[in-house]
Amino acid sequence: MWNLWVATSVGCELPLLIVKSPTAVTLIGMNPHMHLRGKAFRYNVRLPNGDIETLLDIPAYDFNWQTQYRLATPLRIPAGAQIQCIAHFDNSEANLNNPDPTTNVRWGDQTWEEMMIGYFDVAVPKRAATTDNTKPSAEVGLRQTFTQLDRNKNGVVESKEVPEKYAARIKVMDSNGDGKLTASELNAYIRRVKLRNR
Ligand SMILES: [Ca+2]
Ligand SMILES: [Ca+2]
């Protein structure tokens, strides 16, 4: 979790970039959430070619009017795209909803504390896309996960570095069954999967 900190008597902007979609999805709606110091909220999509398009722009956020924005026409989001959320807060006296412009604000459940959440709903195809153009990103994702899990950077993912949710998948790739995943075992797994999908 990032560190939300809104200093007293000023506004600030917080960007939040959400992980790349591994497969094409359909965006159905968005639901921005802030508390009383929330001022503005924008959702962008960053497409795989780097283009950025605005999905939803709320220039005057009202805490009392929290709603889900449903798209009149659901929007296809291609594999590799990212949803970007940008929130503005106003912790000054100019914000008439501000319960206390003299205090710094942190993340919290109460309305006098703050939140920044960019909820969105997507529909994911029942059979995840297996077309050729998703294969490189699946491979890149596996390699990124391997690098992230290898916390002590010795080029091997040991069992103590593996969170429970990944344990079963790592076991499949650990071909010699010694409880450690090496880079060559990862490469061999990627080759096996590619051959099977051919
Ligand atoms: Ca390691
Ligand atoms: Ca091994």
Image (cartoon, grey):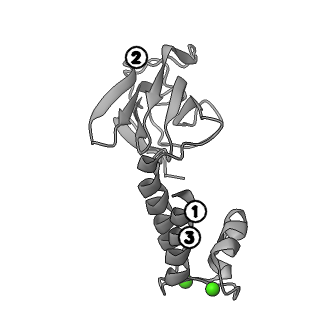
How far apart are the two marked residues, 1 and 2, measured between alpha carbons? 52 Å
- Where 171 sits versus 29, above or below? below
N-terminal label among 1 and 2 = 2
Q: 40 and 54: which one is in front?
A: 54
Residue to which mark 3 is pinned: 192
How far apart are the two marked residues, 3 and 1, measured between alpha carbons? 6 Å
Q: How many marks?
A: 3
Q: Residue shown at 69%/89% (left/top)? A: 178
Residue to which mark 1 is pinned: 196
Between label 1 and label 2, give the one nearer the viewer. 1
Residue to which mark 2 is pinned: 60
Q: Residue shown at 38%/29% (left/top)? A: 92
Q: Is residue 105 left or right of residue 161?
A: left
**Quadrant position of ligand 2:** bottom right
Residue 162 percent coordinates (x, y): 65, 73
Q: Is mark 2 within 8 Å of ligand 1?
A: no
Identified by mark 1, the residue type is: Arg
N-terminal label among 2 and 3 = 2
Q: Is residue 94 left or right of residue 49?
A: right
Q: Residue shown at 49%/87% (left/top)? A: 154
Q: Extreme front residue here?
A: 198
Residue 193 percent coordinates (x, y): 56, 65
Residue 125 percent coordinates (x, y): 60, 34
How far apart are the two marked residues, 2 and 3, measured between alpha carbons? 53 Å
Identified by mark 3, the residue type is: Arg
Identified by mark 2, the residue type is: Ala
